[in-house]
Image (cartoon, coloured by chain):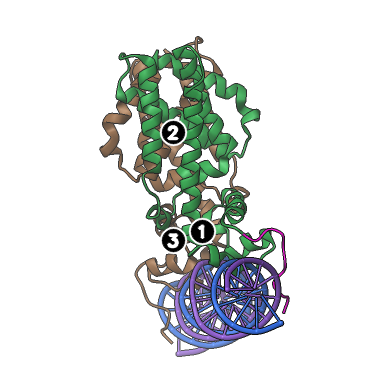
Chain colours: A brown, B green, C blue, D purple
Amino acid sequence: MSPRKSVEQELSREMIMNAARDLFAAKGYAHVSMRQIAKELDYSHGAIYYHFKNKAELFSALVENHFQLLNTELESILNIDLEPKEKLEQIFLGYIKFGLTYQSHYEIMFLTKDEELKNYMNQGPYNSYEKFAESVYSLCGKQVSIQDIWSVFLSLHGFVTHYCRAAESFKEVEGMANYHVKLLLKLVV
Amino acid sequence: MSPRKSVEQELSREMIMNAARDLFAAKGYAHVSMRQIAKELDYSHGAIYYHFKNKAELFSALVENHFQLLNTELESILNIDLEPKEKLEQIFLGYIKFGLTYQSHYEIMFLTKDEELKNYMNQGPYNSYEKFAESVYSLCGKQVSIQDIWSVFLSLHGFVTHYCRAAESFKEVEGMANYHVKLLLKLVV
DNA sequence: AAGATTTATTGACCAGTGTTTAATTAATAA
DNA sequence: TTATTAATTAAACACTGGTCAATAAATCTT
């Protein structure tokens, strides 16, 4: 029996999450096994259960993380010193950039179909949208309706979703993204 | 051993596809087994293999079907006697309606992540988009660019995708759909 | 009615799954 | 140095999955 290996860095929740994230994103929740994740890390699959109760909990820890990241990104754009309209544009673009830069995250956050997982999801999507909507609302003055914001959000979501499925990087579609954003901007200002 | 049952209607490709469609849509490709499909039909799992080579082939037969249906729907809207602008609106709305009425189909057509399945997909999505884009182009005159059409398509796609994931019926979101469509219409006329 | 053909059932195979458990070892504290 | 604790492993359990060969029944053909 091969003994517990002596390593400088023990297995950690973070290491597991990093490995799991990529796998989940690439193949989807159902197609990734605990054994695969463990293999990626060069540990035995049982080891993961020391750090996470089960597969679903590991997954939901990822989701939690990703929504935080999105919120941070949006927040930081909000803090840049720009004209409202410019800022709005950057928010739109920032949303797309986030989605396509962290496709793995985005898939997990918004494109998960699995019923079992939905039970593990919390307020994440709702909170992130709230933040987005409030930002947009405050940047456009009053002449924009809640519905308009929602429509714009869905339109951005459509862009990200499509290119996520095609697995294209943000760089590859940056031109298109700029165009899309400029077009949508017309709807709210 | 229970004998082969005598029925007035033998198992057919169509019957299998009908059962499979709903299951695939509800749970996704990976979560549906040949045994489940068979159970739904009250046949043994082996029977399906007489009609389809394997699971992937059954799935791709569905996809083929669904794109045809979408094309037919768009075609029939095109043939209604309406003002260009009205027609355009109906096309947009028709797309959403299709997506949410046949959520099963839509999932399979545009939201399938599975790599294995992608190999089985043909020109379906491309052809359907072509039809959509040409219709839009011809209905708006020349002042609309290819890029604009693509952006609008992605925006419709975003709407459908979101409500597909939430599993809401077209009736439930019809008001929202109308609003979304009217908004997008501003971008092309 | 007999035989040939088509369609279904069964059961087995093998590969894979999430999870739990009992060892077992490495690191740490006393 | 020893005892203790934390981390890891291998093995087992109890499944589910797709696929297919053997077999049987129903139907069609003659």
Eye-nearest disc, 3 or 1: 1
**Residue B52 to residue B169: above or below:** below
Q: Nearer the viewer, residue B28 or B134?
A: B134
Q: Quadrant of residue A162?
A: top left
Residue type at mark 1: give it. Ala
Is the N terminus of chain A in the top left, top right, bottom left or bottom right quadrant?
Answer: bottom left
Q: Which residue is mark 1?
A: A30
Residue type at mark 3: give it. Ile
Mark 3, chain letter?
Answer: A
The reply to whether discs 3 and 1 touch (Cβ–Cβ < 8 Å) is no
Q: N-terminal of the two: label 1 or label 2?
A: 1
User: For the magenta stretch, what is the residue range?
Assistant: B1-11
Q: Which residue is mark 2?
A: A158
Q: Position of residue A15 (x, y in %)?
A: 41, 60
**Residue B159 to residue D2: above or below:** above
Q: Nearer the viewer, residue B6 or B16?
A: B6
Q: N-terminal of the two: label 2 or label 3?
A: 3
- Report the residue at 46% width, 33% height from top: B157
Q: Which residue is mark 3?
A: A16
Q: Are marks 2 and 3 on the same chain?
A: yes
Crowdedness near tag 3: few (<14), some (14–19) or many (≥20) residues, C-alpha within 10 Å: some
Mark 2, chain letter?
Answer: A
